[in-house]
Amino acid sequence: MAIIINLDVMLAKRKVSLSELSEKVNITMANLSILKNNKAKAIRFSTLNSICKALQCQPSDLIEYEDE
Amino acid sequence: MKQSRTLLFASKLLSFIKLIIIISIFLFSYLFIHARYSPQSVEKLLLTKHTYIEFTGNITKIPTTYEEYKNSDIEGIFFNKLSGGSKFKIWMSGLISLTFVLLIINQLRGFVNISRKEGSFFYNTSQFFKKSSIYCSIYLCLSLVLLYWRSSLSYIYYEKNASNNIIANQIDLQGFYININSYINLLFVILFLMVASKVFKEGEKLKSENQLTV
């Protein structure tokens, strides 16, 4: 897919583990893994809002478009 | 809970139908083998114009010559008087029909079982409809061949002439009753299965998208 999720990059930048983020945003590890591994088909605004709040970043830091 | 119970009932019912069909296949084959070795036991077995097999109890005298048969008011043909090839055609056509019904029932059973197990109608279910439509299409094509087969059954009467030689009267039963409606119905079933396959495939796609939405 041309849309890339840079969750792993942001987690590394903020030095936060996936399990810590999972606790903070109240989303299961399984769902966050789907997001991190670019397997997700869609993302809810509420999820994006929670992740941006927890990682102190903008949606553009997490989502990137790459021409195929 | 109610859905699960309905699906359980459907699964049991389909298993029962499957068992009935398997028994029918064996009985059907047994009948033909039995008729081969013990023709006197099936002398009252009559094939009606729809080529359904039935035992007749109201025939007092079975025609022994072709002339007698032609002059009698019996509607249908005696199984024993058919040629070996014709018997084989009837046996094969019956067997093929039952086998395809069995295959389709099996697919429906698979669909019900997977839906019951997963608790969803959209988990890998479109393949059952697709396979069923393929089976129906093959059966429709084979039916046309069987139709041609059944329209050329041979009826043989062995009669002794003056010099004690056996002569055979053979006729082709051309123009045998053909039920076109059943083929049209089968076409509608194929169309329905194809549409159902597409609908369920779309459902599977939406379900997978929904599952992968975070």
Image (cartoon, rainbow, N blue to C red):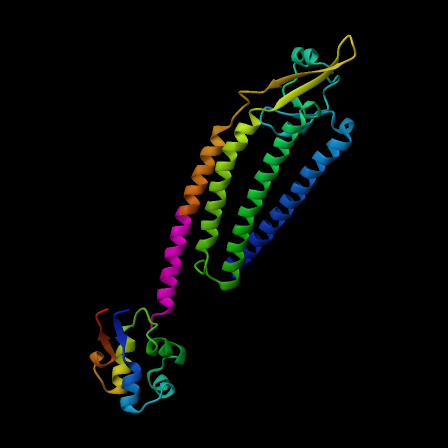
Tell me what residue is drawn at x 27 percent, y 89 percent. A13
Q: Position of residue B147 (x, y in %)?
A: 53, 29
Residue span colored magenta: B195-214
Tell me what residue is drawn at x 68 percent, y 38 percent. B29
Q: Position of residue B176 (x, y in %)?
A: 55, 22
Displayed quadrant of residue B59: top right
Q: Is residue B131 above or below residue B141?
A: below
| Left or right, residue A59 beside residue B212 | left
- Verify whether residue B199 appears in magenta: yes
Q: How many marks?
A: 0
**Pick the front one: B209 or A1:** A1
> Which secondary structure dominates the residues rendered in magenta?
helix
| Left or right, residue A13 beside residue B45 | left
Q: Is residue B16 above or below residue A59?
A: above
Q: Is residue B210 above or below residue B59?
A: below
| Left or right, residue B156 beside residue B150 | right
- Verify whether residue B10 appears in magenta: no
Displayed quadrant of residue B22: top right
Q: Residue furthest bottom?
A: A15
| Left or right, residue A44 beside residue B95 | left
Q: Residue furthest top?
A: B162
Tell me what residue is drawn at x 67 percent, y 20 percent. B156
Tell me what residue is drawn at x 27 percent, y 86 percent. A55
Quadrant occupied by the C terminus of chain B:
bottom left
Q: Position of residue A4 (x, y in %)?
A: 27, 75
Q: Position of residue B93 (x, y in %)?
A: 59, 35
